[in-house]
Image (tube, helix red, strand yellow):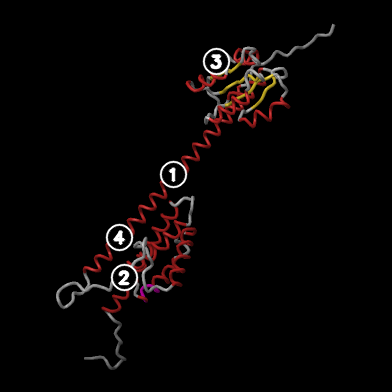
Amino acid sequence: MAATLKRTPSPASSVVWRGLPSTMRVVFITNRQRTGGWLAEALAAENARRVILEEVVGAAAGLGRLRDEAVDAVLVSHEPGELDAVELVSGYRAGGADEAVVVLGNQSEQEMAAACFEAGADAYVCAHTTTSRNLLWIVARAVQRHQLVRENRRLLLADQQRLQRERDEAERLLVQQRALIADLEAIQRQTTPRSGNGSPARAPAKSHPAGSTASSPPPGLPKELVQHYRDLLRTYVIMGSGNLACEMSRLADLLTTAGVSARQTMQLHLQVLEELVAGLGARSTRHVMTRADLLALEMMVHLAEGYRQRYQERVRPPIQGLLPGFERK
């Protein structure tokens, strides 16, 4: 007599519970016929230490329980004419709920799966063709999916808040730099030569358009120079200062030769920087502001060194030496 080997059903693999809460609360919304009830009971019985099943009869009672308690998954019986799971799930999703929802019914999956998906359910299970272990995997995958969706939503919100904080910080820095330029202009007006009656000589009044700021381009600078500095800032943001030292030195020599002051250079820098930050859109501004600050600092160093050399040349001009034999005795 041939021996028959029987495989004892192994418990659900621990892989099912990977990433899931240690105890999963499941609410089973059913009707008086308890469609799929044996499947939900088998799910809770086989995983008694993992699954806590609460059964509620009726759609109103089920929605009330879900409103008052936090759950990990929802099982809904579908019985046309008594408990329409499609309408229940649609209304549940309309309220903003994001828990995993699995519909249990007597109809085949080919008949009901598409309608349940359109209503917002995660899966439809036919009570006559599935097993408790299959239901366990379906519920576990649905719970994991909603956990990932919530995590992605949280990370997206955190990233948006970070970008907003960076933009607010960049705007504060730009406001401070505008105030710095305005203070320098005020100091320059106070130190202007006085007129014959002893009052400070006032420069002709200039009309500023509405909405203009201290970062407007300084007068007298050619458009080619502004565009050159704009290209330099963009290149500096990408490459840093390592490969642009010679370019910055030539630009500083050009500015000193043209008599451009440090205030005008800073005003030019601020105008170009504001244009660049405004064009970033939703991208991060931290890197741009950091590189722009380094560019401004390096440009001020080159400019100060250029003016220092010119001052030294004026104070100590070169002296022509005498030819041999014509030295003074």
Q: Earlier in the sequence, mark 1 or mark 2?
A: 1
Q: Is residue 211 above or below residue 251?
A: above
Mark 3 residue element: strand
Circle 4 crowding by C-alpha within 10 Å: few under 14, some 14–19, many from 20: some
Residue at 72% x, 17% y: name it.
128
Q: Quadrant of the N terminus?
A: top right
Q: Nearer the viewer, mark 1 or mark 2?
A: 2
Which residue carries the number 1 mark? 162
Q: Earlier in the sequence, mark 4 or mark 2?
A: 4
Which residue carries the number 3 mark? 54
Distance in Å between CA atoms under marks 4 and 2 = 20 Å
Which residue carries the number 2 mark? 206
Q: Are marks 4 and 2 in contact (CB under 8 Å)?
A: no
Q: Nearer the viewer, residue 134 or 14?
A: 134
Which residue carries the number 4 mark? 180
Distance in Å between CA atoms under marks 4 and 3 = 66 Å
Relative to 140, 182 lies left or right: left
Q: Are marks 3 and 1 in contact (CB under 8 Å)?
A: no
Q: Earlier in the sequence, mark 1 or mark 4?
A: 1
Q: Quadrant of the C terminus?
A: bottom left
Mark 1 residue element: helix
Residue at 57% x, 22% y: name it.
74
Mark 4 residue element: helix
The magenta span reads 253-257
Q: Earlier in the sequence, mark 3 or mark 1?
A: 3
Q: Are marks 3 and 2 in contact (CB under 8 Å)?
A: no
Q: Is residue 101 above or below residue 324?
A: above
Distance in Å between CA atoms under marks 1 and 2 = 40 Å
Residue 102 in the image, given as x and y percentages of width and height: 62, 24
Looking at this view, name the residue that lies furthest to the front: 81
Q: Nearer the viewer, mark 4 or mark 3?
A: 3
Residue 323 in the image, given as x and y percentages of width and height: 31, 91
